[in-house]
Amino acid sequence: MRTFDFIVIGSGIAGLSFALKAAEKGSVALITKRGRSESSTAWAQGGVACVMSGEDSFDLHIRDTLTAGAGLCDEQAVRTIVTEGPSAISELMSLGVHFDVRDNGNGASELDLGREGGHSKRRILHFQDATGLEIETRLLESIASHPSIELLENHMAIDCITTGKLGYAMQNSCVGVYVLNEATGEVETLRSDVTVLASGGCGKVYLYTTNPDIATGDGVAMAWRAGAAVANMEFIQFHPTCLYHPEIKSFLISEAVRGEGGILVNERGRRFMEHQHPQKELAPRDIVARAIDAEMKRSGAKCVYLDITSKPPEFIKSRFPTIYETCLRAGLDITRDPIPVVPAAHYQCGGVKTDLFGETSLRGLHAIGEVACTGLHGANRLASNSLLEGVVMARRAFEKITSKLREPVDISLPEWRSGSVQDADELVVVSHNWDEIRRLMWDYVGIVRTDKRLKRAATRLRNLHTEVQEFYWNFKVTRDVLELRNLVTVASLVVDCALSRKESRGLHFTLDYQERDDARFLRDTIMRRI
């Protein structure tokens, strides 16, 4: 057993921000299941939404967030995160994070603020089209030299260790985690009174996603198994514009392209969003994604097109260098050619239920970033609010946790016992089940849903859960087996939450109940393990 003052699971903006602060108060184990820079943060193109202009206001940002959230946002959470945003941005900039600037016309520079869907003003701070990578890089530079942080790369958290499972006569609490060391194949026992989940979302539960391969819902699944409350998992945001190309998977075409004048057209070159919403291409993401889905189904086309060729070539190359170069490698010159795009699973708006300090319903367990459900996003996330939430909630969680630190409880944790397991000799079962989960989620639990499809998904997932659990108990744990176990758990949570919401709201649209029902469903969908 190894003991730390803080255990942090995840190396994106939330986990790194928290670890940096916590390291000033004690020892930190920073766990990341792949390399240190492999996170959804590093893939984020668009930017950070924050009020940084005299033409903008907190009230406008709050209003836009509440509007996008379709009635389910926690207004206090929205107000808190929005108003604390500027100071959090200042902290990032003090760590060396760069954001693009421009000449204000008076010989001075100012932040070059972009605009994205659902925003009434330009308020997106960005670094070209690789904002997340810039933030990730600077935070990792600060982490690298810190003596109090032990970075455990290629380590995968398996489960929370709770006093309830250990049989202690005390309030059920998280007191550590079991972690698979992939280099040795051994499971290590880490002890701490403070465990912070910052493990990101679950995009890989779907066949098509903009997320990196690591996004398998590990934190939500761990928290669920430990007994923490989970909320609003039916609200999975599909990004409207993922590059459609046979050789390039999961590449996002940033919403900022539409913010700078890109238009959506069908295979005949006709614009269709102007008939769907007053904001056209800059409507909230759920509306744009459903419009694209409907257009594809109506015409039988495999994709639609995002056209920004009306802008000067030099502007496109300088504003979107990553997108330009990636498309060029695929044989597309976006200064001349429209970009083929399709919707893809992008962001988990629900998650482990927390308060405004990252505390879950399980003592000792905290959640920040995409893995958490703070109430900011409601039924649909406003573009670029996620990086803001990650950095603000990391600070709030740190301040609350360190304000009430007590002497560690003297608890000895048992070592992991594998029993008489053997190495998995039929890994084809793992890959088959993985593919089946992702395909059934895409076909039955996608952008447009019905009760019939959801019930079919629930039935098959119950059977898959039994198969996966049998595999988990009978074979030596590997990352593939653990991710599969988490995927089937999170998929079931998404389906169960979706089945319980008999209305259409935000990202949850069902043909069986096409209207909002505020009388019965103006509330969070909260799930607790029995």
Image (cartoon, rainbow, N blue to C red):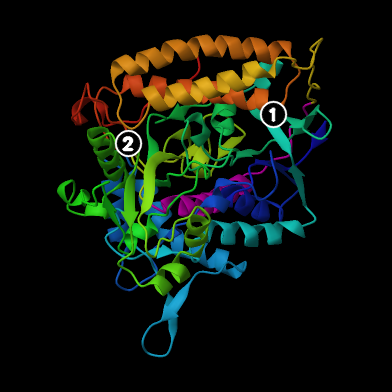
Amino acid bearing label 1: Arg
Q: Quadrant of residue 407?
A: top right
Residue that label 1 marks: 479
Q: Is residue 344 magenta?
A: no
Query: Is any part of residue 526 visible from this angle?
Result: no
Which one is nearer the viewer's eye here, 260 or 88?
A: 260
Q: Quadrant of residue 137?
A: bottom right
Distance, label 2 to label 1, CA atoms, is: 31 Å
Query: Residue 507, labelled with which disc?
Result: 2
Q: In x, y percent, where is residue 496?
A: 40, 19
Callout 1: 10 Å neighbours few (<14), some, many (20+)? some
Q: Is residue 385 placed above or below 201 in the rendered structure? A: below
In percent of the image, x 53 and y 13: which residue is there? 464
In percent of the image, x 21 and y 24: which residue is there? 513
Give the total of numbered labels: 2
Lower position in the chain sequence, tag 2 or tag 1: 1
Q: What element carries label 1?
A: helix
Query: Is any part of residue 431 visible from this angle?
Result: yes
Q: Main secondary structure of the magenta part?
A: helix
In percent of the image, x 21 and y 51: which residue is there? 270
Residue numbers of the magenta segment: 383-411
Residue found at the far bottom of this picture? 107
| Left or right placement of residue 278 versus residue 47 in this view | left
Query: Residue 392, labelled with which disc?
Result: none
Q: In x, y percent, where is residue 260?
A: 33, 64
Q: Is mark 2 on a helix, strand or loop?
A: loop
| Left or right placement of residue 372 versus residue 32 in this view | left
